[in-house]
Amino acid sequence: MFTTYVLYSAEVQKKYTGHTNDLDRRIKEHNLGLLGIFTKNKGPWILIYSEQFNTRSEAILREKELKTGKGREFIKNQTGF
């Protein structure tokens, strides 16, 4: 299973969208600053939304959709963030 997820940091009032095959591990990595420049030292990151998929390609497609204007609006409507 693969998960597309959206994290939120109240510290910087930013969202981060990604995909993974191990959501718990990935959130820990983001909060430890082990992944990328965008999330490093900007946490704590909290999970505000996730969807599961059978394949990585489906998860990547949904990640791309959530990064569009319509996708950001969908997340705002679903989560309030």
Image: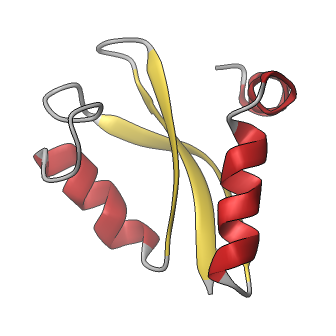
Give the position of the C terminus as an image quadrant: top right
- Decide if residue 30 is on the left or right side of residue 45: left
Q: Is residue 52 left or right of residue 77?
A: left
Nearest the eye: 56 or 76? 56
The answer to whether residue 60 is left or right of residue 21 is right
**Position in image of residue 19 (x %, y %):** 53, 62
- At x 45% / y 19%, what residue is drawn? 14
Is residue 65 among the parts visible in the rendering?
A: yes
Residue at 13% over, 29% down: 41
Q: Give residue 24's position: percent from left, percent from top.
A: 37, 69
Where residue 71 sits, quadrant-wise, is top right
Q: In which quarter of the image is residue 74?
A: top right
Image quarter in which the N terminus is found: bottom right
Q: How many marks?
A: 0
In front of the other: 58 or 45:
58
Q: In this view, does 68 lie to the left or right of 56?
A: right
Relative to 29, is 3 above or below? Answer: below
Q: Residue at x 21, y 34 (%)?
A: 37
* Residue for point 38% across, 17% down: 10
Is 39 placed above or below 5 here?
above
